[in-house]
Amino acid sequence: MKIAVAGTGYVGLVTGVCLASKGHDVTCVDIDKDKVEIMQKGVSPIYEPGLSELMTESLAHLTFTTDYQGAYRDAEVIFIGVGTPEKQDGSANLSYVYKVAKQIAESVERDCVVVVKSTVPIGTNDKIEAYIHDKQKNDVKIYVASNPEFLSQGTAVKDTLHASRIVIGVEDKVPGEILKNVYDGFEAPKLVVKRRSAEMIKYASNDFLALKISYVNEIANLCEIVGADIEEVTDGMGYDARIGNKFLSSGIGYGGSCFPKDTKALNWLANFNDNEIRTIRAAIEVNENQKFKLIKKAKKYYDDFLFLNVAVLGCTFKPGTDDLREAASLVNVPLLMEDGAHVRVWDPVGMENFKKHFPEKIQYCKTIEEAITGADLCLILTEWDEVKQFDVQKYEELMNKAIVLDGRNCYTLDQMKNTKVIYDSIGRSAVNQDLLKK
Ligand code: UDX
């Protein structure tokens, strides 16, 4: 099929490349000329495992362009995968989506299906359809379908090629059948539902996962107080199939492009409709506090951070990505610096992006060893494999004062008990506290 994709961020680019890998002829449209030039050479502008390889393999079916008119004119299906960033009031900013909708309305010269992949508030697809019908230049049939995206960064290609489900939200049979054909080569359950249900499935799913994380973080905080161990607790919970054993890792809260934005957007939508969604509001509040958990813990060990050398391991919102959106590092590092600490940061792929936020004053380190040498405190913010596999004896050997605060529970307590490292993690007993007295 002849397909166009608007936007080449995580959602748009991964969708375009995966569709091309199944033999569709895909044209990806972006307004950024430089980005388009890079992609034309078969290079992915984002770090995503397997994406560059799949792009290279599928180049025969892929075109990258800034010429939206040419791309949309005779496409059978047009995916919208542009961003819907959070506005000040928590609602979703739909200006990019509408801009693309206008371009589509003015360009299409044949019957087509416009597929909204961007996460949009419930009811938006109805409005987009009315808007496109109002603005369309040619007398053709344009359907609008909702097809939310459930990919996670770091596993985006796998999540798209082997999706847990493909949700198709339509109000007519025709676009439903067309989309089923588009996804014919994808092995995943295909659910055809009402358009508003599809929009809600996306928010309800993401917000449920966010809720699960905030819940487990609150349980972890309580475990610390009452002397239980969160790892044992979540392990015990996970055997119940109704709870499941995934997404139960406690830590310093969720970040990324989806959970923070989508929880706030659903909360906003409920308020806007004179309604309340108290569970989600609580999840948001818990998460905002949880991000400061390590700084609070650090105050147990130091009254202030003036002149302290602090190593920060990991600055991305999770491993496997260079994305910093809503990462705990973005709120923790400024606090350390404001308090007079010398901050050294190590991250295997996120440092270039981090430098854009903090061009000065931070020491960027090529290795974990370099970051921790002579440090008075080490904060682990992202559970990269390099951190998990690090020889923990080295904290003892290289740090000035071996205090490690682990926001992602990278090590077992037994592992740390064999060292002279003062180790404090989430939802578990602090280790080697007796050394503080010496
Ligand atoms: C998420 C959803 O998983 C995906 O379905 C949706 O389409 C987009 O949002 P993503 O943001 O890429 O994907 O990352 P995810 O792996 O879900 O992690 C999000 C955040 O939650 C990370 O900061 C991660 O560290 C945190 N998290 C995740 C936990 O704190 N504990 C967990 O058990 C799982």
Image (cartoon, grey):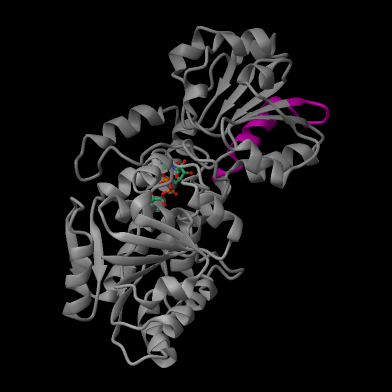
**Picture coordinates of residue 256, whole percent (x, y):** 50, 49
Q: Residue at x 57, y 13 (%)?
A: 432
In-front residue for pair 59/374: 59
Measured along the vertical axis of the image, is residue 86 above or below residue 155? Answer: below
Measured along the vertical axis of the image, is residue 9 above or below residue 293? Answer: below
Q: Quadrant of the N terminus?
A: bottom left
Left or right: 339 as drawn, with respect to 314: right
Measured along the vertical axis of the image, is residue 366 above or below residue 287? Answer: above
Q: How many marks?
A: 0
Residue 269: name its quadrant: bottom left
Q: Residue at x 62, y 29 (%)?
A: 379
Q: Residue at x 40, y 43 (%)?
A: 56
| Magenta stretch bounds | 290-309
**Picture coordinates of residue 150, whole percent (x, y):** 34, 55
In-front residue for pair 367/211: 367
Residue 304 is a magenta residue: yes
**Picture coordinates of residue 266, whole percent (x, y):** 43, 67
Q: Quadrant of the C terminus?
A: top right
